[in-house]
Amino acid sequence: EEEEKEEESDNLEIKNWAQKFLTKHRATALSAFRSLAITLDDIALATWGLASLEHRDEALMRAATEQADSLVTRCGHKPLAQHLPRILWACARLDCYIYKFMETVANVFEPARRGLRHLGPDAYHALIWSYKKLDKSNMYSNFRYALDRALWGLVKQKRKVRANHIDLDPTEDVSQKLRKEIISIPRIYYLRNQLMFEKAVKLGEMGPDADMMIKRTHQEKEASRLAKQLRIVRNQEKGYSQPMPKLSWFLRQSTNFT
């Protein structure tokens, strides 16, 4: 706990220093955002940094988004799919309501132009969360609906396909008690999908670089392995046999098999 407190104190000190530095060199930052030499990658990283530091400066964000607008036509969909969600997320984190940039992002990834297919799952999360926060007047309801449908499509994919997407921790999943009460398997699937969708949208607050995978400690992995072994032993005690090996295994052992 003491180490965590020291680390938190150090992070706060660095954050305060960075905010003071940005305030002191604000004019330099503005001119950098307006420079013709700046790239979309530079803007995305800079705005992400401002959001991470919680340094709200609407003039800086407007200069950044205006320059990003001017660079959109020079980039393909893949770099746009990587950088635009990060910039819009920074706007949402800093409560900067820049409707012109919101319009640009909606036009770039409009379903009719097949722009959504270039977005990764984390970008979907960030965009859905950002528009939900910024679009108070529902001006982009059609685009938000398209994002929701696309994310639902990812959630409904089979587990093997969705291995790198959102998943539920055992503490977040539908409880065994509720499963017994519901009984209907399709209803349980729907509830699980709904929980995964809500978790995905919530992850959007952490940005397009959020870690979506479940992390387990060595102790948790060891406990899971032991629990699996105990289940096997109990099944054997009840008279249940292990699954029979596939015939192909025996065929591979035979040297005379042709």
Image (tube, rainbow, N blue to C red):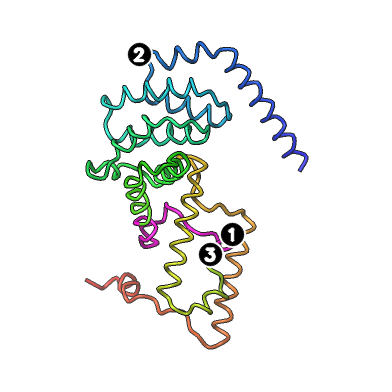
User: Is residue 20 left or right of 159 when viewed as pictured?
Assistant: right
Q: Is disc 2 placed on a helix, strand or loop?
A: loop
User: Is residue 109 left or right of 135 when viewed as pictured?
Assistant: left
Magenta: main secondary structure equals: loop
**Residue 18 at what x, y percent from top left?**
61, 21
Residue at which label 2 appears: 36
Q: Which residues are magenta?
A: 153-172
Cα gap from disc 3 to disc 1, whole angstroms:
18 Å
**Residue 235 at what x, y percent from top left?**
54, 82
* Quarter that holds the N terminus: top right
Q: Quadrant of residue 154?
A: bottom left
Asked whether the residues under the numbered discs 2 and 1 touch, taking CB atoms below 8 Å apart as contact, a structural biologist would say no
- Decide: few, some or many residues near mark 2? Use Cα within 10 Å; few <14, some 14-19, many ≥20: few
* Quarter that holds the C terminus: bottom left
Cα gap from disc 2 to disc 1, whole angstroms:
51 Å
Residue at which label 3 appears: 173
Q: Which mark is residue 221?
A: 1
Which of the two marks, 2 or 1, is nearer to us in this view?
A: 2
User: Upstream in the sequence, badge 3 or badge 2?
Assistant: 2
**Residue 128 at what x, y percent from top left?**
42, 45
